[in-house]
Image (cartoon, rainbow, N blue to C red):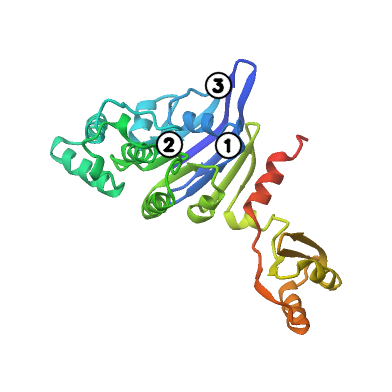
Amino acid sequence: MLEVRNLSKNFGRIQAVHNLSFSLEKGTVLGFLGPNGAGKTTTMRMLSAYLEPSAGSIVIQGHDIGKDSLAVRKVIGYLPEGSPLYGELTARQLLVFIARMREIPKRELNSCVEEVMERLFLTEVAEQSIETLSKGFRRRIGLAQAIIHDPAVLILDEPTDGLDPNQKREVRRLIQAMSSEKLIIISTHILEEVSALCNRVMIIANGKLKADDSPLGLLHQSRYNRAVTLRVDDPQSIASSLSNLPQAARVELRRRELTVFPVAGAQLLPEVSKLAEQQAWQVHSIRQEEGRLEDVFRRITTEEET
């Protein structure tokens, strides 16, 4: 559904995006990650035909952006950073305007607007001017305009920015419900969102692609993969006993939590559990970790250029 080859973008002497190449299929929910200034928003603006690449090509649904950007715009929905909207319009007026721009047939227009307002819980503010609404409502209107024409490809830049926890949950459910029939690209700083929604993750830094894997594949790269974390009453006295286990490479203490890291190939959880039982420790929780995405993200994005 989407193919990017050798994509680059320069702003004068600044190279914001450098030689990105990747392809994405229907049913993919891509988490597009990177630190501030990494080139995420610039890339998404090129994918949406808002910015012209300095070099490289983008093909979406068989349409080359460089040759037919209008055809590309028809098959994508785009939620830009900040949700720029016409504040003097009401929520309904804005969505009717977008529906007309998207060439939704007149006989279907009103039903499309009503449906998308219901899906994003906007009915109660339908007649209010957008400039009077909270950031959360404006963000949901921005998402509504992106999906109103049922696009094959969704490009969402921080889709849950400004939403409260309940609103975030509803938006995530909506994205999950659409995911099997679409290609969805999500740029986000919320790493829990990646674990909850995405089946593929790309990390860029300094405009370059640094990682491309499944969320589970990235977790397996974490130093916490297969480590055991305990929450106990007296962690300092317990730490020395854990460090003496042959299967333990090292022990880290943070507040009331202890994390024990295994030596290569060791099965650590059974040994830690047995020791805790033998010593009658007051253990409030114990878990074997898959890994921590934040740990992988930090390592990948702070590695020095080679």
Residue type at numbered disc 1: Ser
Q: Is residue 70 left or right of residue 49?
A: left
Tell me the quarter of the picture where residue 177 sits: bottom left
> Badge 1: how crowded within 10 Å, few (<14), some, or many (20+)?
some
Residue on which disc 2 sits: 60
Identify which residue is drawn at 67% across, 58% down.
Answer: 220
| Mark 1 or 3, nearer chain start | 1
Identify the mark at residue 238; answer none if there is no mark.
Answer: none
Report the front residue among 163 and 111: 163
Residue on which disc 3 sits: 54
Q: CA distance from mark 2 to mark 3?
A: 18 Å
Q: Is residue 235 left or right of residue 42?
A: right
Tell me the quarter of the picture where residue 37 sits: top right
Viewport quadrant of the C terminus = top right
Residue type at numbered disc 3: Ser
Residue positioned most to the left: 107
Circles 2 and 1: CB atoms closer than 8 Å: no
Identify which residue is drawn at 77% across, 84% down.
Answer: 278
Q: At which x and y percent is residue 277? A: 73, 83
Identify the mark at residue 21; answer none if there is no mark.
Answer: 1
Residue positioned most to the bottom: 278
Placement of 78 over or under 183, stated as above or below: above
Report the front residue among 157 and 120: 120
Placement of 144 over or under 271, stated as above or below: above
